[in-house]
Image (spheres, rainbow, N blue to C red):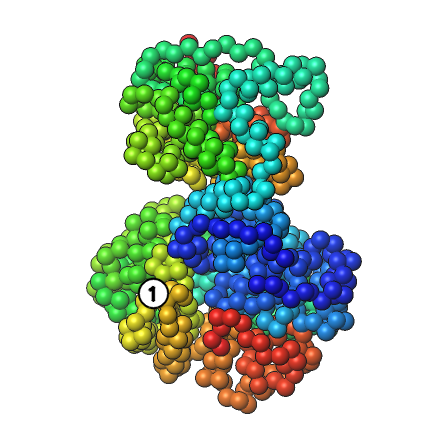
Amino acid sequence: MKNIPIDLPIPTEDLVSCVSCGLCLPHCPTYRVTQEESASPRGRIALMKQAHHEGAINEEFVEFIDSCIQCRGCETACPAGVQFGSMMETTREALATQTRYQPWWARLGYRALGWRKALRVGSTVIGIMQRLRLVPRRLGLPPIPILQRSLIPSGSDVWLFTGCIMDAWMRDTHRAVQRVLESTGAGVAFPDKRASCCGALHVHAGLAPEARRLALRTMQAFPGTAPILVDSAGCGAQLKDYGHLLGTDSARLFSERVLDVHEWLAQHLDDLPKKSGLSPRIVVQDPCHLRHVQRSHESVYKVLGRYVETVSLDDDGLCCGAGGAYSTFHPQIASDVRDRKIQAIEETDAQEVASANPGCLLHLRSGGLEVRHPLEIVDALITKDE
Amino acid sequence: MVHKSADEKLLSDLRSFLGDRARDGDFELGLYSKDGSVLKGDPMIVCLPIDTEEVQQIVLACRKHDRPFLARGSGTGLAGGAVPVGDPVVIATAKMNKILDVDIDNRIAWVEPGVLNLDLSRELSPLGFHFAPDPSSQQVCSIGGNVANNSGGPHCLAYGVTSAHVAAVEVVLPDGRVTLLGDLTPESPGYDLRGLFIGSEGTMGIATKVAVRLTPNPPEVRTLLLDFADVRDGAAAVSSIIAAGLIPAALEMMDQRAIEIVEAFVNAGYPTEADAVLLVELDGLPGGVEHGVEVVRAVAEHHQVGSVRVAADDAERALLWKGRKNAFGAVARIKPDYYLHDTVVPRGKLVEVLEKVYQIADAYDLIAVNVFHAGDGNLHPILAYDADEKGVLERVQAAGRAIVTASIEAGGVLSGEHGIGLEKRDYMGMLFSAHDMATQDLVREALDPDGFANPLKVLPSGSRCSDSFGQHVPDGAWV
């Protein structure tokens, strides 16, 4: 029974752009671990076509749509250039606005991400609980700092976007990134609390109105024309999408200023300190939002490759299973997907993994791997040289 | 749409051993209602077995409840072979995806049917071997599907199609017995039932384990891209290359429209201005390959080639192939639907038949895209269209029939490698006499007397007496 009415506002020309050839299937992490059509991009588009055509859905539909990690690996694999990501976002937005998709407690959680004080208090509580050993290790949370030192700006050549979770839990990574940026002679500015969340997780969850609100607020925190650098692949992809999300000229101009921090550094390679000494072998995990969405993962190899021997994986950039909040809501699939990634990593003989996205980094760490942000690795090597 | 309720007793029987891997959800059934073709059917139940025993139990349960069944691999078939007609149970073997054993000494690997073709070759690569048949869909198509369709691929010109690379198959027969067809010895006595099964499109049972032959990776490979200002020169060069005594590992052709859509996807530097390109691959010992490159160059120059590009390294080679192998999907850049044929014509008639294809497309106001295995004359004329356009289906159907007629008149055959399935079933009479088809039907009946396995496929209705599951033709079918 398809008993929940729905209006899926996906343009017909987008829906029919998929000829269901199936070439996306092996590039989809959830298809790879289930081998089921319902967990494939082709299948999900066919579901959207059915719902669009019939105007009604059921729980089965919601479950299948919700199982997508939104890695968008299918987009780089698709010979017809089907815009899967935007169709999935539209579908989730329709679910969140027209059905009971995303319960109140989930909405509250997402809301708190954009509310710096709430996030800080919550994080401090978790941090204290961790020290009292009240947080199970299997949750895979990193050691969360209780007291945070502020980030200190050093100029206005470039902005460094700080984000929500990353700022609350991994501010030391921002500090390392800042030092690497400063080693090129650039002065780094930080945004105020208006840029406390990019809204990526909200878009993924179908909470587009909230995402638009966060986008408008974030844009105000970056006056001027200096490049806006991002050290989280997921946030960078989202900031680059503001032009599309808001559809305004100012949003488009804003998005044009956004660069993944490695993209900017790859343009300033000669300004980086020279390397010296032996370099370890490091496996580079390409975050999906860098490889499939921003399509700029090569810059990580350029920057990191100046200091270490980089090893790339031969798994076609298949997702690691983190997917922002995905691994929290779908722990089993996320862990099955991660197992494939871990196997691919272990087949190389490298000791450590570099990941340019905090979600992937934490997810892989909780799978038992040594993982650092690429620029933490660079920072450690530069600092050692000094 | 309200789906008819599944046969409750059958479903509960299936659930007793499959648990939640027997599905009847409205949306999920819709996902298994079609394959890579344009046709749509209507499955009753979808089963997702994980081993031979489960497949056998499903077949027995279907028989008990008088319900036909059909096997499905990755669902990339282009002739509707895996489209469920007659309300059958779909047995999707995708979860049976283990490589069971690799025996390098005997150059055999035992694999389950759901193993993806390219996954197998990648797994074998460190050992210096691969599975030779390489359909364009090789990144996703399954070994089971390759067996069902006796699939080919660009490199089958030199290496032969699937049948030449499968030593034995474990099969669940339509009556539920499990048997082994073929064996691992080079020559076995008696009828070649393995050969009969390969290419039978699921009408003689379901493959549950496959013993594939392993092909050593060639020591040297060269890939050349030749472009021509006139598609006729390219087609003529194909015949001349083979006439010069070479059998390239692959010899592929793409016309201008194909080049354009493919280049938009891969950015491999395909010459979008050219009327046609040939992708020629030579492999073997270094001396022989170098000689071959010179022969191809000389032949191409004789046929007014624009330029000859030799891929400099593996990365460039891979990119050129990525373009070729994604061509069908890329057609969506022109129109949302496509219908393609798979006829084979004598190489000497390539130019003539290609011209006819363009004339036919023009006459029916359709767009033709040609990307095909030129070396063995296996055409893949694609008609791109928008199904929402009024009356377009009739034009596509008529143009398709005209293309098949032209190919057969030129001394060709109906299908090279995609199978007959549902889509080309009713063209069989253009190639075979009633007597031929009745004889084929006798063979089929010998293995499936009650018509349980993939009913209504391959042979036109009427050629058999026991089509016991009705004549339901699915939406969108023009058979």
Question: Which corner quadrant holds the N terminus of chain B?
Answer: bottom right
**What residue do we see at 32% from left, 35% from top?**
A248
Q: Quick check: A226 left or right of B147?
A: left
Q: Residue furthest bottom?
A: B435
- The residue positioned 26% from the left and 55% from the top of the image is B272
Residue drawn 60% across and 22% down?
A142
Q: Amino acid at mark 1?
A: Val
Residue A318 at x, y = what percent?
Answer: 51, 41
**Residue B319 in view here:** yes
Q: Residue at x 36, y 49 (%)?
A: B266
**A60 or A28: which is nearer to us?**
A60
In terms of depth relative to the viewer, which is nearer, B382 or B13?
A: B13
**Does residue B191 lie above or below B119 as drawn?**
below
**Chain letter for the residue marked with disc 1 in the picture:** B
**Mark 1 residue crowding within 10 angstroms, few (<14) / some (14–19) / many (20+):** many
Taking B132 as reference, is A233 above or below it? above
Q: Position of residue A122 (x, y in %)?
A: 59, 19
Q: Name the foreground residue: B168 vs A15.
A: A15
